[in-house]
Amino acid sequence: MNVGALSLGQTPPLRVPMPFLISAPVFLLAGALVLLFGQAELFATRWTREMLALTHLLTLGFLGTIMLGALQQLLPVLAGAPVPAAARVSVALYGLWIPGTVLLVAGMGLGGPWALQAGAVLLAAAVALFVVACGSALWRSGSRHDTIPAMALALLALAVSATFAVWLLWRTGWQAPVAHPVTRLHIGWAAILWIAGLIMGVAYQVVPMFQLTSPYPRGLRRTLVPLLAALLVAWSLWPSPWLSAALAVVLSVFAGMTLWLQHRRRRRISDPTLDFWRVAMVSMLLAALAWMIWLVRPDPRLEVLIGALFLAGFATAAVNGMLYKIVPFLVWLHLTNRNQEAGLGQRGLPNMKQVIPQRHARIQWWLYTTALALLCLSVLFALPPWPAGLAWTASTLYLLWNLIGALRCYRRHLRPLGSEKAV
Amino acid sequence: MTTFSQYLGDDHGRCDELFAAAELAADARDSGTADAHARFVEAMEHHLRMEEEILFPAFEEASGSRMGPTAVMRHEHEQMRQLFEDMSGALAEDRFDDYLGMAETLLILMQQHNAKEEQMLYPMTDRMLAGSRQALLARMQDA
């Protein structure tokens, strides 16, 4: 074993993850505004330009941006292996990913092959860079935790899904792509293995950490994500409803186990992150149930509901909850390290609940839960989308305000050190 | 045969139990919070001593470096100790909210620290120090 390969202390600078974490909610806000000003029949089918743009504001803009930022931060901790040239990789990723997402979504919503082409090129370059950078960190990891193969499979799925997307755009002549057999594959790989697989790999570690639960049973940790990958390959080759049902069952087992572990947690005090994760897991169970119903009785509205529960429920809630642990801890950690470098103690620095007060996280949880419920009701009962849009706008603005508050707290406490450079 | 991973990993679990009890007491503004906190800190100090006085020196001798992973671990131990002290100070003045905020901070610091030890450092010491493991574990039990 090479001791030199083990780097336990290499937290990247705050400017590596933070621009991603702060920018992501802006895309969610844009999505909320689409709902607010969207036409009454927005949710009748997923095959419209508006729905396509809306979905990608959520997946690329919000979820993707946070996952890119968070993974660069989490890899050194969870895998013991930092991303090589972290600061430069982060700048390049941000410069490719953010304009790429803006262009692609604009091309989808407003039309214009050049915007789709430019967006696809930038995003493809970002995905390639991200997969190579994180993949090489995982490769050098000294950890044998089951998180490592789960993350590796998720990264692979991101690359596969992006390849399908570029192929679809090229094949359909750079028109916003609609119904096509390959669309199913793009969605399957992106949602099931990239998004869910990554959240599962991270959950294996952070659920026991944050709530002091028992670990996930070893057998589940070992098998769930590789099983998802194997089923996904089979499902890609043979579109059988039995394989779809099997995928839904595997995802439900993960969600059910997470709820069970959290129910039996040792840490009993109230915690907004815990409640975000509970909403996430219940949404996953409902999404799986809706998928099962859809297999028996296909319906375009049900398709939209599955997407809403999975993306705006499961993935968004998990990511939103994580932000309330990652961001305050990073602010505390970097202030502490800066103080110690300057020969000062860590006394007088804000603790995590002073960086983002818990009541503010709690209020945002209520706004988010209301927004999610209104969204699902609008989809299910063909209601106009503006009430859901209003709630999403409020929830997202509150989230953004909480994150900006954390950054301002960081800068305020940095100033006494005489450092002009903040993030 | 017991390994460092098992012995010290189980001890992390014991410390976590005491942490959760102290935090819950503070959340309930319980008059027994100071005792619960003292029990937690005592268990933690014992754990940190076992590492700093027995495990880390043996690891450093075997690897020939004091600047490797153990230096990072020692640094994080010091950050934890500062929080223990600040938390005691908060309790002495009945500042329960400050205590809970610091407890949240300590939890994340401690858990990410434990994860690095349990997933990387302990398995590595299990392999590197296999020959002297039983003697070292016996010293830890007496520490």
Image (cartoon, coloured by chain):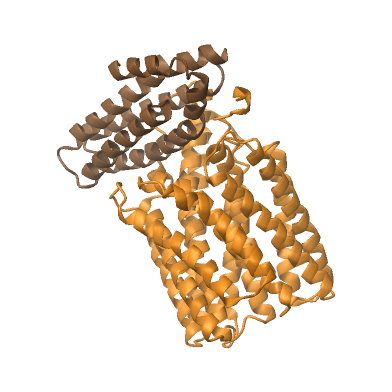
Chain colours: A orange, B brown
Q: Residue at x 47, y 67 (%)?
A: A284
Is residue B65 among what the camera can see?
no
**Relative vertical location of residue A116 with respect to residue A376 in this rendering, above or below:** above
The front one of A69 and A291 is: A291
Q: Is residue A316 left or right of residue B41?
A: right
Q: Quick check: B20 above or below A272?
A: above
| Percent of width and height locating residue B79 | 42, 27
Q: Position of residue B26 (x, y in %)?
A: 23, 42
Frontmost residue, B10 versus B41: B10
Instruction: Tell how many labels.
Output: 0
The residue under the point 52% across, 20% down is B128
- Side of A406 relative to A91 (left or right): left
- Give the quadrant of the N terminus of chain A: top right
Q: Residue furthest front?
A: B1
Quadrant in the rendering for residue A369: bottom left
Q: Looking at the picture, how far across and down is residue A302, in whole percent?
A: 53, 82
Residue positioned 38% across, 50% down in the render: A357
**Picture layout, residue A46 above or below residue A140:** below
Residue A266 placement, left or right of A255: left
Any part of residue B1 in sight: yes
Q: Work out which residue is located at the far left of the displayed protein and give it.
A: B31
Residue A85 in the image: state x and y as whole percent: 71, 36
- The quarter of the image holding the C terminus of chain A is top right
Tell whether A312 sits left or right of A83: left
Q: Is residue A41 above or below residue A87?
A: below
